[in-house]
Image (cartoon, rainbow, N blue to C red):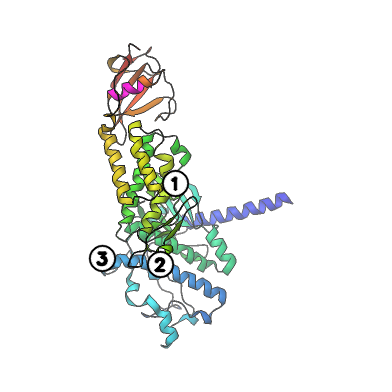
Amino acid sequence: MRRRKTAVAAGCCLAFLLGTLLNLLFIPGSEHPPPPREELPPSPPGAPLYPPEEEIGGGQAALARQIRERYEEVLRYRQHRAAAAGRRPLRPRERRLMDLAPPRTSAEQPRPPGPRGRAAAGPWAGASAELSLEPPLLGCRDIRDVSGVQYLGSGYTKAVYKAVLNRTLAVALKAVDFGGHDIAHCVRQFSALGDCYRLAAYKIVKEMILLQRLRHANVLQLYGYCYQDSNDIPDTLTTITELGSPLEMIQLLQTSWEDRFRICLSLVRLLHYLAHSPLGSVTLLDFRPRQFVIVDGELKVTDLDDASIEESSCTSNSDCFMEFPARNFTLPCSVEGRCQSMNEKRNLYNAYRFFFTYLLPHSAPSSLRPLLDKIVNATGELHWGIDETAAQLERVLSLYKSGEYLQNTTRMPKAEYRRVPEAFIPDENYRCWPSYHHKGCLLSVFDVNEAIEICDSYSQCKAFVLTNQTTWTGRQLVFFKMASNHIVPDPDKITYVKVTD
């Protein structure tokens, strides 16, 4: 009996997974909105999207209200862009957000003007019908023939897959997870799969708009999107984005300080941009390492469906209370009735508690540690804003790249070294931490003098090899060796052998 229950449960999970995968890949689709159905003529401007809640069932009314609120949120983000750019005609390949509005039943058709009808119309008149998404670079035709499909993971709302387009471009495909928490909870509560899908899909639409609007080196690129019919639901949405590697904190702690510093610098540059973005100050309400990925060594935010540009209103400082697991803060309430820099400070403290404390100080160059400790302490107490934090981290980068951090250190070599040009020691490795090579001691140096200083600090180091490889800061990679018994020719390397101790 237990085996039968296990098999049934496994079958249900597999069905949900296959449903989501079919939604992503194997159902023909088009980027263009489908032609309007004859039984559902478009509504004139100003008509209410939903009937008054008294006229539909309580559960249906609650779901309709949630859909309307999320749809209004999507429109607010899109209207902000439209206001900045001015009104323009729709392009043939653009998808109107109004096409995503739920089709109305006969009970929802326009009624004669009256107090109830006017109240329901709200902001839906006129210009909102012209709000649109930008035309995609990639669309449905590009994901019909994919290879290497691999499930990467899922959250409350979305499932994410890796896929290879045209056997050359690796991308991430995101779609609503039909077996996810949001859909399952909504269906249990309202028994309306189509409307529950629409409620969840608005989070993906919001993320698409933010990815289009927030153009920055540390924001994941949106390549395109596709509307297709799946699971008896018309116009399900799949987004096509840049592919990154998941952020694994345990692995990051084992990497070099230089790479960990790059992650923190990427994050601070991102938060500085979000604090001064075209949309205003943007806060990441769901700020966790899993919301970020690494692309070519740079940190990028990938999940923006829980981002917000709403500034908290207040009448006194007590209204500007921020609560975290280990600390609480009260920010000042401005004369305009807004909590000063709350979005910015929330992002900054989360960066401190999830990233800075673990990645910044450990195994850093000794001369940089006082400045790094100052940065960590100031952000942990929220004494600095993002502008000062970014300026101080850029200062650390400048000191590190220029070699100025070495000026206050004693650099008298303890031993003499013989220079052997165009030579390499293939073996004689020993391990050190942190290292760029898991089987040897491969570190970055500013110059030969720093390499000598490092070799002098390791009792087992008897030689080192300068390679022609550099890190992202332009520093040279050097192999440190425990002996020099076997030296071979190599035109791209220079070997230094310790001749006296």
Q: Nearer the viewer, mark 1 or mark 3?
A: 1
- Residue 42 shows in the view: no
The amino acid on which the numbered mark 1 sits, given as a three-letter code, is: Phe
Q: Which residues are magenta?
A: 449-455
Q: Is residue 31 magenta?
A: no
Looking at the picture, how far across and down is residue 224, in whole percent? 36, 56
Q: Is residue 451 magenta?
A: yes
Label 1: element kind: helix
Looking at the image, residue 108 lies above or below residue 73 = below
Label 3: element kind: helix
Q: Work out whether mark 1 precedes mark 3 in sequence or the reverse, and give the earlier one.
A: 3
Label 2: element kind: helix
Q: Circle 3 is placed at which residue position?
A: 85
State how far apart marks 1 and 2 are (Cα).
28 Å
Which of the image's four quarters has the C terminus? top left
Nearer the observer, 192 or 406: 406
The amino acid on which the numbered mark 2 sits, given as a three-letter code, is: Glu
Q: Circle 1 is placed at which residue position?
A: 354
Looking at the image, residue 383 lies above or below residue 126 = above
Looking at the image, residue 343 lies above or below residue 459 = below
- Residue 130 shows in the view: yes
Q: Nearer the viewer, mark 1 or mark 2?
A: 1
The secondary structure that dominates the magenta segment is helix
| Local crowd size for mark 2, using a 10 Å CA cut-off: few (<14), some (14–19), many (≥20) | some
State how far apart marks 1 and 3 are (Cα).
37 Å
Q: Nearer the viewer, mark 3 or mark 2?
A: 2
The residue furthest right is 1
State how far apart marks 3 and 2 are (Cα).
19 Å
Q: Work out whether mark 1 precedes mark 2 in sequence or the reverse, and give the earlier one.
A: 2
Q: Circle 2 is placed at which residue position?
A: 73
